[in-house]
Image: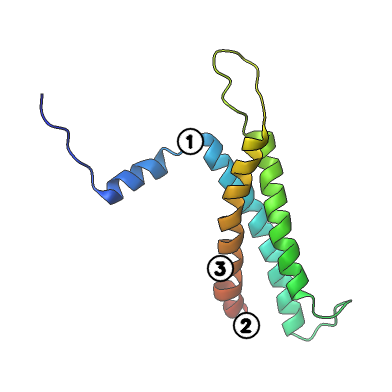
Amino acid sequence: MPPVRQRGWAEVRWRQFRNAPRPIVRAVLSSLVVAAVLATAYLAYDVALARGTNMPGGDLRILAVTVYVVVVLVVGSVVTYLVVPQPSGAGSVRRRSGWSAALGLFAAVPIAYLVIVVAIQIVRPVLG
């Protein structure tokens, strides 16, 4: 029997990326969609303030980012709880638990951060 070929680090990661479990993909995509929509709304608000538009309440960017983070975390957890069932084994009963919500929360934390950083540091300067 020939020896097993050792794969390189990049090859292993690429294979893991291509074969990601569906629950993980659903958790990440649900958080990513919510984060992208809310970051777009934040950018519109930020651009309007920069152009001198009077907004009711004044400059509430800190509050807007706080609401963004909270909503992405909560919606990411809830949507993942709803769309990612626990493995059912031999039965056909689909169960949900707090672990599905925890998966959504843990997926939402880095996504919320990365999306808002890209929006503020990369997209915002392009918009002027």
Q: Amino acid at mark 3?
A: Val
Please tell me which of labels 3 and 1 falls first in the chain. 1
The secondary structure type at the circle numbered 3 is helix
Residue 118 disc label: 3
Q: Which residue does the numbered mark 1 point to in the structure image?
A: 21
Crowding at label 1, few (<14), some or many (≥20) Cα neighbours within 10 Å? few
Residue at the left extreme?
A: 2
Seen at 69% across and 35% down, the residue is 82
Quadrant into which the C terminus falls: bottom right
Please tell me which of labels 2 and 1 falls first in the chain. 1
Discs 2/1, front: 1
Q: Amino acid at mark 2?
A: Gly
Residue at the right extreme?
A: 56
Of residues 73 and 119, the one drawn nearer to the viewer in this rendering: 73
**Vertical placement of residue 98 versus 120, above or below:** above
Q: How is the image coloured?
A: rainbow
Residue 86 in which image quadrant: top right
Residue 27 in which image quadrant: top right
Whole-percent x and y of residue 5? 17, 37
Q: CA distance from mark 3 to mark 1?
A: 26 Å
Please tell me which of labels 3 and 2 falls first in the chain. 3
Marks 3 and 1 in Cβ contact (< 8 Å): no
The secondary structure type at the circle numbered 2 is loop
Q: Which residue does the numbered mark 2 point to in the structure image?
A: 128
Q: CA distance from mark 3 to mark 2?
A: 15 Å
> 123 left or right of 44?
left
> 18 left or right of 122?
left
